[in-house]
Image (cartoon, rainbow, N blue to C red):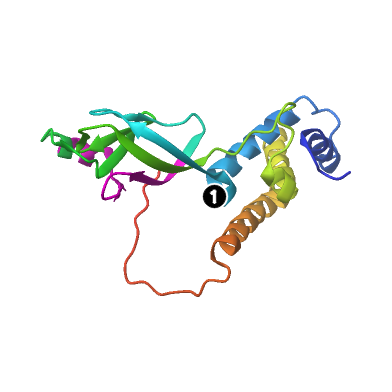
């Protein structure tokens, strides 16, 4: 059976594991595999762009599906690309109680905090990575299942092996699951950089993850 949706994925997991007694647990195995996928992959299909605003002196609450920051731009004149810094450094900056166009931000408790404090209402462009849309009986597919069905299959079989304490099953599918994640990364890189000449750079970027 081809894996085309949530139901067929469950059937294939049962078939590949040669277990007919775990039907009620298979959705949990899928959920756990999906959680690992969501935290380990980045792809253009997970990028969301929001045009919104921040209030004077205010903060900004992150969307419910937020899973990582790409960029935050203040659409002032001139435009300011804000820099993400650790929260304790921003707190030190904010001891001066300066206000103006924000240049820095940190993330605490699903909230953006700014420095300087916004002295006016500012329009922002916020690009972030959303969580992988979860499979369910209602949301029966997503782009990973469509393009990389084996990632879900192998990851779920690893979780099944952990649940049943089947070391041979884990050993068989763990490396396949990791390889499937590499396939997703490779596809992302191919889409992002194909046709562009490689350039050497002398600078570097430090990424902060929440």
Percent x, y of residue 99: 16, 35
Q: Dot 1, how many residues are within 10 Å of its Cα: few (below 14), some (14-19), or many (20+)?
A: many
Give the total number of marks visible in the rendering: 1
As rendered, which of 146 and 39 lies closer to the eye? 146
Instruction: Kindly give the residue lying farthest to the top in the view shown.
Output: 24
User: Mark 1 highlights which residue?
Assistant: 42
Whether residue 148 is visible to the viewer of this picture, yes or no, is: no
As rendered, which of 14 and 203 lies closer to the eye? 203
Whether residue 139 is visible to the viewer of this picture, yes or no, is: yes
Percent x, y of residue 135: 69, 33
200 is higher (above) or lower (below) than 19:
below
- What residue is drawn where x is 10% and y is 35%? 96
- What residue is drawn where x is 73% and y is 26%? 138
Q: Could you say which quadrant of the image residue 24 lies in?
A: top right
| Quadrant that contains the N terminus | top right
Examine the structure image and report whether residue 79 is included in the region drawn in magenta: yes
Percent x, y of residue 200: 40, 75
Judged from the image, the secondary structure of the residue bearing numbered disc 1 is loop
| Quadrant that contains the C terminus | top left
163 is higher (above) or lower (below) than 16:
above
Instruction: Kindly give the residue lying farthest to the front in the view shown.
Output: 77
Instruction: Kindly give the residue lying farthest to the left in the view shown.
Output: 96
Q: Could you say which quadrant of the image residue 176 lies in?
A: bottom right
Percent x, y of residue 51: 43, 38
State left or right for residue 87 relative to residue 208. Answer: left
Q: Could you say which quadrant of the image residue 29 lies in?
A: top right
Examine the structure image and report whether residue 8 is included in the region drawn in magenta: no
Q: Which residues are magenta?
A: 68-92
């Amino acid at each position: 059976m081809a894996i085309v949706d949530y139901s067929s994925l469950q059937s294939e997991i049962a078939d590949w594991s040669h277990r007919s007694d775990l039907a009620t647990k298979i959705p949990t195995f899928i959920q756990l595999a999906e959680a690992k996928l969501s935290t380990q992959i980045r792809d253009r299909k997970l990028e969301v762009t929001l045009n919104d605003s921040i209030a004077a002196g205010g903060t900004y609450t992150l969307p419910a599906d937020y899973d990582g920051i790409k960029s935050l731009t203040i659409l002032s004149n001139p435009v300011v690309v804000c820099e993400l810094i650790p929260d304790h450094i921003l707190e030190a900056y904010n001891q001066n109680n300066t206000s103006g166009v924000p240049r820095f931000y940190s993330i605490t408790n699903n909230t953006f905090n700014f420095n300087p404090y916004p002295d006016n209402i500012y329009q922002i462009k916020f690009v972030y990575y959303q969580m992988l849309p979860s499979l369910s009986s209602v949301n029966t597919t997503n782009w990973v299942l469509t393009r990389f069905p084996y990632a879900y299959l192998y990851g779920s079989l690893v979780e099944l092996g952990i649940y049943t304490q089947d070391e041979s099953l884990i050993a068989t599918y763990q490396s396949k699951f990791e390889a499937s994640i590499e396939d997703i990364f490779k596809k992302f890189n191919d889409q992002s950089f194909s046709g562009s000449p490689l350039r050497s750079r002398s600078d570097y970027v430090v990424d902060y993850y929440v």
